[in-house]
Amino acid sequence: MAPLKLGMVGGGQGAFIGGVHRMAARLDGCFDLVAGALSSDPERARASAADIGLDATRSYDDFRHMAKAEAARPDGIVAVSVVTPNHLHGPIAEAFLNAGISVICDKPMTATLAQAESLAAAARSSEGSFFLTHNYTGYPMVRQAREMVSQGAIGTVRCVETNYLQDWLAETPDKDNKQAQWRLDPAQSGGGAIGDIGTHAHNLTCFVSGQHATGLQATLSSHVAGRTVDDDARVTIALSGGAKAHIWASQVAIGNENNLTLAIYGSKASLHWSQENPNMLRFAELGQAPRIITRGGSAAGPAAAAVTRIPAGHPEGYLEAFATLYSEAAEAIRTKRRPAHSLGIQEGLDGVRFVDACQRSSAQNGAWIDLP
Amino acid sequence: MAPLKLGMVGGGQGAFIGGVHRMAARLDGCFDLVAGALSSDPERARASAADIGLDATRSYDDFRHMAKAEAARPDGIVAVSVVTPNHLHGPIAEAFLNAGISVICDKPMTATLAQAESLAAAARSSEGSFFLTHNYTGYPMVRQAREMVSQGAIGTVRCVETNYLQDWLAETPDKDNKQAQWRLDPAQSGGGAIGDIGTHAHNLTCFVSGQHATGLQATLSSHVAGRTVDDDARVTIALSGGAKAHIWASQVAIGNENNLTLAIYGSKASLHWSQENPNMLRFAELGQAPRIITRGGSAAGPAAAAVTRIPAGHPEGYLEAFATLYSEAAEAIRTKRRPAHSLGIQEGLDGVRFVDACQRSSAQNGAWIDLP
Amino acid sequence: MAPLKLGMVGGGQGAFIGGVHRMAARLDGCFDLVAGALSSDPERARASAADIGLDATRSYDDFRHMAKAEAARPDGIVAVSVVTPNHLHGPIAEAFLNAGISVICDKPMTATLAQAESLAAAARSSEGSFFLTHNYTGYPMVRQAREMVSQGAIGTVRCVETNYLQDWLAETPDKDNKQAQWRLDPAQSGGGAIGDIGTHAHNLTCFVSGQHATGLQATLSSHVAGRTVDDDARVTIALSGGAKAHIWASQVAIGNENNLTLAIYGSKASLHWSQENPNMLRFAELGQAPRIITRGGSAAGPAAAAVTRIPAGHPEGYLEAFATLYSEAAEAIRTKRRPAHSLGIQEGLDGVRFVDACQRSSAQNGAWIDLP
Amino acid sequence: MAPLKLGMVGGGQGAFIGGVHRMAARLDGCFDLVAGALSSDPERARASAADIGLDATRSYDDFRHMAKAEAARPDGIVAVSVVTPNHLHGPIAEAFLNAGISVICDKPMTATLAQAESLAAAARSSEGSFFLTHNYTGYPMVRQAREMVSQGAIGTVRCVETNYLQDWLAETPDKDNKQAQWRLDPAQSGGGAIGDIGTHAHNLTCFVSGQHATGLQATLSSHVAGRTVDDDARVTIALSGGAKAHIWASQVAIGNENNLTLAIYGSKASLHWSQENPNMLRFAELGQAPRIITRGGSAAGPAAAAVTRIPAGHPEGYLEAFATLYSEAAEAIRTKRRPAHSLGIQEGLDGVRFVDACQRSSAQNGAWIDLP
C-alpha cells in the first residue's frame, strides 16, 4: 500500500524528538513525510526542511498557514506530527484538526488543562483523528503484560510500581542544550519531571493495569539551585480497581539513563519489565520458578506477536516501539477503526489532569486530590 | 584464641533464626555454644538441646533460671543469643544483662516501645553489652557503601531508596508454619512486615547514609483476608542530613524471595546494592561509565576488606554477613571496645521507635510524625 | 538529500531477511525501494511486489532482465539488495555489477569458493560497489570495541571468544518453514550453521580484533537425524597478530535465541559484548573495577557516536545496526569513498574461505588448514 | 551429636585454602579441629597453631609423627584435612590412611599419576576413608542440575561447556605471594591452570553429566614471560555417553575473578549455572519460556533441598558449599556409608589422569588421548 502523506510541526535542527518521529514514521513504510513547519524561525525552518529533503514549497513558516495550505491541496497531508515544546501542542493540534487533518502528537498532550479541554472539543468536531505518542506502549512486552493482566494471569492487582529515572538534569545543563532549556521553563513545558516523564509512567501504569486513576497524592521537588520546575516526583495513585500505584519519576537520579521500569503485583503472580532491556518480561507465579517471556519467543501471546517485526533474540528497541504507534495510526486512519489500545484525547486529558493534580497536591503538602 | 562461651534462648526445633545464629556464631570460631533455654516447652527444650549436642545439665527450661545459674558458674557463658519471638526479647535480654551477661539479640529489639525503654535502662546499668543483629550490616559491600558515602564519594545525599520484598506471606500460611504464626500474631510480633523486615530496611538506610530519621509518614496495609497485622509498608523518612528516604517493605510481593535492595543517590554519584547478589556494589558517577565494585576486588576499601574472608569471586553470603556481627561482638566483649558501626541499644531504640511511629502515622491516615 | 533508488532480488512472501533489509534501507531515509525481482516464481513475485507497494512495471520475474532494464532507465536503481538463498548471491550480484549497479548482498557472499572468486573478478571491473551485510558490525558497541582494541585499550590481544548460539533448528523443522528448508539444503546454503552464523562469528572476530585468520581447525557436527548439513561448529583460528580465536556456532543449543557474544582478552584488559543486550559493553582493566560503557553514554567514543541515533538508555536494536550498513553504503555510493570499516569483496572472500576451510578441516578430523 | 575430632596438615600462616577448610569444617558443627601440622617450618607451625587456638601439645612439626601420635591417642583425630601444595598430598594422605585415619584432601589428589596410584593402593587397605574436596559439587544448584540431568529433564546430553576463568595470574605475581609461588612451580603443583582449576572444571562436568571422560585433546599455553607452567587450557573431552564436553580454564583472563560456569545442553532442554551467582539455575526447555530455579525455592528438588541451610533469597556461598562436603564426610565416617555423589579415590584418579592426558596431548600438538 502507498504510504500516507505526513506533515510535521517542530523537529527542526537541534531538536531530539522530531528525528525520532521521522524514523518511526519511516520504519514500517506507512507514512511519507512531505510537508513541515519545522521551526518557528523561518531561516531555521527552511534549513531544516532542506536537511531532511522536504520540497521547499511545502516547508512552511507558520503552522496555521500550513494547515490551511495542506488541507487545500489535492495531494495534501492526511496527518501531521506535532513535536514542538509542550505549550504549543494544543494550538497546533487544534489548527490541524480544524482543517480535518489527523494529528499525531507528542506527550504531554498540552501544557495546561485549559488547553487540553479546548483541544478535546476541537477533536470531537473534527473529521481527523488524534493520536498521542506515549511510545512505551508500543513495546511488544508491554503489550504482552497488558494482555496477561487483562486475562487474569496475575490475579487481582495488588499494586503497580512504575519508576522512570534519568540523570541528564542532575546538574544545571549548558545554555545551548535546547532540549533542556524549554523543559526547564515552566511556561513552555507546563512542568518538569512530572510532565516530561511522570506522564509516561502514569500512562504506562494505566495501560498495563487496565485501570485509571481515581485520586492521587504527590510530592514534587527540585534538587538543583535556581531550578523553577520539579526534577523529582513521587506519586501515590488510587487505581479504579482498588489497588495503589506508586510512581517515582526523577531526572536527577545519577546512574540512570532512561531507566523506566514497571512491576505489577497481583494476588497470584507478578510481572516485571524494564525499558532498557525491553525484549523480555519476567513472569513469577506464586510457588513457581519465575519465567522469562521473550519478544518473539514461544511464550509471547497474540498482542505481542501483532507488533513484533523480527524473530526472538534479534532485539527491537525504542524506535521500533515508536514506529508501532505510527503504523497503528496509519491503519486507523485508513480503516477508520481504532483498536482498544490506541491512545488519543482521553489518555491525553488523563495525562494533563494527572500533572495538574500532582502539582496541586504537592503545593498542598501532599494532600489527597480526587480525579474525575 | 579460645572461643567465648555462648548461651541461647529460643531457637528450638521448628525455629529458623536460631539455627542461623548458631551457624553464624560458629563460622569464625569466636563462640562456643554451651548452654540454652531453647524452648519454653520443657520437653521441646530438652530434645532441642540434645539435637545440637548441648550438655543436658546446661539445658534450661526457664531463661531466668538460666541467667542466674550461668552467672554463678565459674565457666558460665559470657554472652547469650536471644532468638525468640519479638515480645520476649525485652524480658530475656534484661534478665541476662542484669546478671552481667552480654546479649546478642535478634531484631526488632522489642515488641513495644515500653519494653525497649526498660531494656535500655537495664543495659545502662549492666556490665554486659547489648548487640543487635541487623545482620545485613555485616555484608562487606554494605560496609563499602557506608564508607564511600562517609568519604563523600556520592556527594550530598539526595535520597535513599530501600526496598525489602518477600512473598512468603502472599497467602494465608499453613497452621503448622511456626515462623509465620508468631509473626502474624501482633501480641507476639508487635507488628507485621513493618517490624519483621521494615526495621531492617530502616536500619540499613541509616547505616549506609550515616544519618538518622527525624520524622516519617507511613501507610501500612494488609492484603490477605483475616490478617491482623500489616503485610506491606510504605514509609517516607526525613533524614537528619535533609534528604528523604523511601522504604517499601512487603511480604506479599509475589516473585520476591528475600529481595532487599538499597540505592543511595547523591549530588555526584549513586550506589546500588542487592542482598540476593551481595558481592557487588554498583557505583555510578555522573558522566562516567558505572563501575562494579566487588567484594575482595581491588576497588574495595578497608571497611569491606576488614570483613572479607575469602577472595573475590568466591561468593560470601548471608551466613557470613551474620557471622561478622558475631565475630565483632566477640572482639568487642574481649577488648571492651565497640567499633562505630556496631549496633546496640541506640539502634534498637531507633528501630522500635520507627515501628511505633509508622503504626501511629498509618493509623492517622499517613500523618507526619516527628521522631526524637 | 533525496534517497537513492534501490532494487531488491529475493525477499518475497514468506522470506525473513528481505523484510529486514527493507526496514533497514528505510530507517534513515537513505534509500527508496522502487524495483524488485522478489521471487523466482512469477506469481509470487507479482504478489510480493504488490504487498510492499512496488510499481508493477518495476516488478521483474528475472533478475537478469531486471539488471538490464534498470540500468537502461534514466531513473533506474543505483543499488540492489540481494537477499536470496546463498547459492544465488553470486550470479545475481555479478549481473548487477556487470550492469554498473552497486550491490548490497547478504552473507555469506556466495555458496562456493568458485562463485566467490568469480564475483570478486566481476566487482573489480564494475563501476558499482559491493557491500556485504554482516550486520552485527553496525552495532555502536561493536564499533566501540573495535576502536578501543585498535587504540590499545586492552593491550596485546590474547584471545577472542565468539559464540553464536541459536536453538531454532534443535529439531527437524516443519516442511513449510521456508527459512529452514533452504538453509538445510547444502546445495542452496553451501553449509549449515558454519555458513549461516559461523561466518558472522568469524567476521565479527576479525572486525573487532583488527586481525585476520591465517589458519584454522574445525569440527562440524550434526545433532538431528537425517540432517545433511552441520548444525554445530567449533573452530579454533590463528589470528594474524599471533593470538587464537575460538568460535562456537550452534543452531541446536536449546535455550538460546540469537545469542551472539564476543569477548576479547588482552594483556591489559578485556571487553565483553552480547548481541541480545547490545547497548552496553563491559570493559575490565586488570586491577580495576569493571566498567559498563553504554551506547550514547559519556564513555562511548567517536566510532560509536557516529552510528548512534538516539540518546543513552533508549535502546537501539538489530534493525538500527542493520540500517547503519545501509546508510553507510548510501554515503559511500554518493561520495565514492568507503570508510575503513566498510565490508566488501575482501570480507566476503574471507568468509567463504573460512567456511571452505572449516569444511575441509572437519572432513580431515580437525586437521590444521592454512589460510592465504 | 558431638563433633568429630579433626586434624589438619598445611594451612599455616599465609595460606588460603587452610582457612577455608577450617571454616567449612566448623560451619555445621560436625568437626572440631584439635591437632595440626600446619607448616613444615617448625616455628611457623607453632605460631600458626597458636593463632587458631590449637593446644600446643597437638601441634606437630611433622605429619608422619602426627599420624602416629594421633592414631595412638584414645582421643585422637578420626580425620585429617590435607591442605598443602599438591606434591605433598599423596605422601601425607598415605601416612594417615596407613594409620587408619580418614583423609579429607584438597584437589588435585596428587601432583603425579604415580602418586595417585600409590595413594589409591593405600586407600584400598585402610580402615579410613578418603574424601576429595572438589567443593563446587557442594553447591545446591549443582546438585539440582545433576539430579535433573539424571532424571532426563534435558533429554540426551548433546554437550557440556564448562569454563573456569580467573585473572589473578594475568601478570607475574609478587614474590611474596605464597599462593602464587607454589602454583607456578611445576614441581610443587604438577601443572598450572590445568591442575589448579581445570581439574575442577573436569570434575564438575562429570559430576553434573553423570558421565566420565573416555578421551580428550588439549592445548595448554602460557601467556606470561618466564612462566614454566600453563596458565590457559582448552580441552575437548569425549564423554562416556557419546557427547563432547569443552573446557576452557584460564588464570589470565582479565576481568574474571572466579568465574566458573557450566552449561549442559540436551536434546530437550539446557541448564546454566554460574558459581559467582550460585543460588540460581537457568532451565530452558525447547519451545518454553526459560525458568529460574532458585536454591530453596519451590522448584528445587530433594537433592538441592538436602544441602540447603537457609531459605530462598538468603544467599549461600562458597563456604557453605565447602561445608557441605565436610558435613557429608562426617556423616559418612559416622555411618560408614557414602552417598553416590561423594567424591573419593576414583574421582581423584580421574582428575590426575585428566591432567596427565592434557599435558601429553598438548605436548603432541593436540593429539587425541584415550582414557581408561
Image (cartoon, coloured by chain):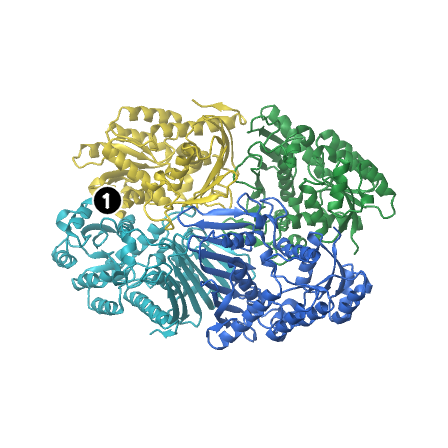
Chain colours: A yellow, B green, C cyan, D blue
Q: Is residue A134 visible?
A: yes
Residue A11 lies left or right of residue C7; in this view the side is right
Q: Identify the image quadrant of residue D25.
A: bottom right
Quadrant that contains the C terminus of chain B: top right
Residue A189 lies left or right of residue B157; in this view the side is left
Q: What residue does disc 1 label?
A: A54
- Find numbered disc 1 in the image and state the secondary structure of the residue it sits on: loop
Residue D307 lies left or right of residue C30; in this view the side is right
As drawn, D177 above or below A176: below
Q: Nearer the viewer, residue B9 or C91?
A: B9
Residue D331 lies, in percent from the top left, at: 68, 55
Q: Nearer the viewer, residue A219 or A241?
A: A241
Residue A292 lies, in percent from the top left, at: 45, 45
Q: Identify the image quadrant of residue A206.
A: top left
Residue C78 lies, in percent from the top left, at: 19, 57
Q: Nearer the viewer, residue D354 or D347?
A: D347
As drawn, A217 above or below D274: above
As drawn, B294 above or below D110: above
Q: Identify the image quadrant of residue B264.
A: top right
Q: Amino acid at mark 1?
A: Leu
Residue C158 lies, in percent from the top left, at: 47, 68
Crowding at label 1, few (<14), some or many (≥20) Cα neighbours within 10 Å? many
